[in-house]
Amino acid sequence: MKRHVSATLDIAVTDATSLEFKIAVARTPGSELSESLTFTLDGDRVEAREMVAEHGTRVHLLDSKPGSLHVEYSASVAGKADSPPVTDYDLSKYLRPSRYAEADKFFGFTGGEFNLSKPHPELLQDITTWVGSRLLYQAGSSRSTDSAVDTMLSGAGVCRDFAHLTVALLRAVTIPARLVAVYAPGCDPMDFHAVVEAFVDDEWRVVDATRLAPRSALLRIATGRDAADTAFLDNHGGAITLENTVVTAVVDGEFPSDDYATPTSLT
């Protein structure tokens, strides 16, 4: 499968600031990546610095003066990425509560809601299905500061909210889990998408309670504890306004199907 993705961002920078972008496809062994990334400020080309973080995540750092900043990214990816590596530190880190996935607040709830004696693969499916049936996907229903607890109480959200609640519940039942920002061919509405990787049967398996896109077509961008690690744009210092965002993601050839139950890893 060959996938083609792009992202265009228009940002009004009011005061000089430092920006971080996570919009480039992660570099993963086994796949072939060709891409282009440009930044222009008031029509003049400016250069960003690339920092490589965990799990192939790439962060592009840009110190920007006031003005109109235009960002364009496009990439084509062929081949299948190798299975994500597994480290003892990852398995420890992705069991801990985090800013948007407060697993410690769900210990009592999970004990009463789920059969904790089930094997982890079955428990993973039960939790993913539960989140998908419990929440209403509704644009504009949540805030960027909402956590898994907020989402549980409101009963609605967007992909990051579904992912945060899934991650928190999985960690609460001792399944290591992390959030992955992805390009998602077939996603409707099309945007940057968030899914979950859970460690079961000695593999990182991807699940998506929203069921908005087939998992086999997803392309990894950033991986981390929650949205604090994977947001496509971070602002440090000055004032900015994100005026426009356009994301595209398509595949060549026949579009894949997904039953959302078969164990699947990000490729």
Image (cartoon, rainbow, N blue to C red):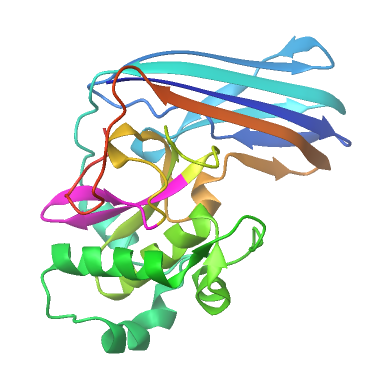
Q: What is the x, y in percent for residue 3? A: 37, 21
Q: What is the x, y in percent for residue 160? A: 51, 55
> Which quadrant is the N terminus positioned in?
top left
Q: What is the x, y in percent for residue 50? A: 53, 24
Q: Nearer the viewer, residue 90 or 208?
A: 208
Q: Residue at x 68, y 28 (%)?
A: 9
Task: Indicate left or right for 129 with 34 as reference.
Answer: left
Counting the numbered discs, the total is: 0
Above or below, 197 relative to 11: below
Task: Indicate left or right for 128 with 189 as reference.
Answer: left
Task: Indicate left or right for 138 with 166 as reference.
Answer: right
**Magenta part of the chain:** 194-209
Q: Residue at x 22, y 42 (%)?
A: 265
Image quarter of residue 221: top left
Residue 23 visible at all: yes
> Which quadrant is the C terminus positioned in?
top left
Image quarter of residue 156: bottom right
Q: Is residue 202 magenta?
A: yes
